[in-house]
Amino acid sequence: MHTIKDEHMSTHRTIGVLGAGEVGQAVADKAVRHGHEVLIGNSRGPRTLEALVDRLGPKARAVTAEEAAKPELVFLSVPFFAVPELTRLTTWSGKIVVDTTNQFAAAGPYRGRYDVGDLTGSEWVAGHLPGARVVKALNTLYAPFIAADPRHAEGRLVAFCAGDDADAKAAVAGLLDEFGFAALDLGGLREGGRLMQLDGALSGKHLLLQDVG
């Protein structure tokens, strides 16, 4: 486990956000506050997002799910069980996809665990997004902690990352650092994903990193 430093600041100025629940809204807010253009879409269409983008300001635009999936970096914050519906949404090959999902079998209220066999949740997600460079991140944090300022007098809120593509993971970590989080690399989707996923050792843990030196 190690901190990924700021030299990997994100060059992705336009960010897609799929899903407009609490996590999607928190990510979109962080992105626009740091100068990114945000395309946010959901399954119900842009009209349902008008009030949200009004709050987010001129750098946010409500779009279709297809349009939100077009940027080279996309945050995935849809319900876990809805992921198979995204396979044909766009050409995923080469895109960086930040997987913030958790393996709940149902939503509203969340209950039960979606069975993906021996796979980690993000390995299963990657299997439905052919060619995507999937990075697991932010799923261990409750949405209000993502929405709040991650910088505290005692340290920065830790955002764990896991992924099999080192460059994609560095780009995501740079973006999270830009947002004020302390990005910590846990390795690949297999080993790191197991620690981060629902019921994993780091699920629901909110930790602060004190920078030294």
Image: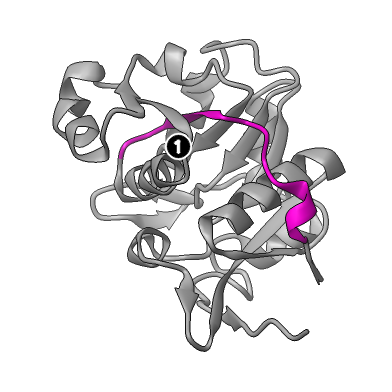
At 40% from the left and 39% from the top, the residue drawn is: 32
* Percent x, y of residue 3: 77, 68
Whether 82 is drawn above or below 198: the answer is above
The reply to whether residue 139 is in sight is no
Whether 40 is drawn above or below 123: the answer is above
Q: Is residue 194 left or right of residue 44?
A: right
Q: Quadrant of the N terminus?
A: bottom right
Magenta-colored span: 5-20
At 58% from the left and 43% from the top, the residue drawn is: 99
The reply to whether residue 196 is in sight is yes
Q: How many numbered badges does the structure rendering display?
A: 1
Magenta run includes residue 194: no
Q: Quadrant of the C terminus?
A: bottom right
Whether 175 is drawn above or below 180: the answer is above
Residue situated in front as seen by the camera: 41 or 35: 35
The quarter of the picture where residue 96 lies is top right
Q: Is residue 102 left or right of residue 196?
A: left
The quarter of the picture where residue 131 lies is top right
At 63% from the left and 75% from the top, the residue drawn is: 201
User: What residue is shown with label 1?
Assistant: 81
* Percent x, y of residue 25: 33, 44
For the residue labelled by badge 1, is the local secondary structure a helix, a strand or a loop?
A: helix
Residue situated in front as seen by the camera: 88 or 211: 211
